[in-house]
Amino acid sequence: MRSGDEFSRLFQYLTVQVSDMFRDPAYFLALREHVLPRLRTYPSIKVWWRAAALARNCGR
């Protein structure tokens, strides 16, 4: 994921305009098996949460 190409593909995959992926068990399985192991190789990551940027409660 250190190449620009891999990051672009991941970014496009994770930033979708629909929420059905959050109800799809295969999505979470792919995250657990493919994405999270790679992210664990970094000392830290920063995640931007849209709801937080809009000062909204994430649970709404």
Image (tube, helix red, strand yellow):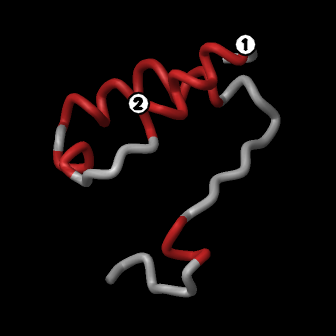
Q: Residue at x 28, y 33 (%)?
A: 27
Disc ID at residue 31: 2
Position in image of residue 50 (x %, y %): 52, 67
Q: Amino acid at mark 2?
A: Leu
Label 2 to label 1: alpha-carbon separation:
19 Å
Res. 41 image quadrant: top right
Q: Is residue 16 left or right of residue 3?
A: left
Say above or below: 58 vs 41. below
Q: Quadrant of the N terminus?
A: top right
Q: Is residue 50 left or right of residue 5?
A: left
Residue at (57, 76) in percent of width and height? 52
* Residue nearer the viewer, 34 or 7: 7
Residue 43: image location, x then y, percent: 82, 35
Q: Position of residue 12 (x, y in %)?
A: 47, 32
Quickly name the residue at label 1.
3
Q: How many labels, in total?
A: 2
Q: Quadrant of residue 39?
A: top right
Identify which residue is drawn at 64% across, 53% down.
47
Kindly report which numbered mark, 2 or 1, lies closer to the viewer in this rendering: 1
Quarter residue 31 falls in:
top left
CA neighbours of label 2 inside 10 A, class few (<14), some (14 to 19), many (20+):
some
Q: Earlier in the sequence, mark 2 or mark 1?
A: 1
Mark 1 falls on what kind of element? loop
The reply to whether discs 2 and 1 touch (Cβ–Cβ < 8 Å) is: no
Q: Quadrant of the C terminus?
A: bottom left
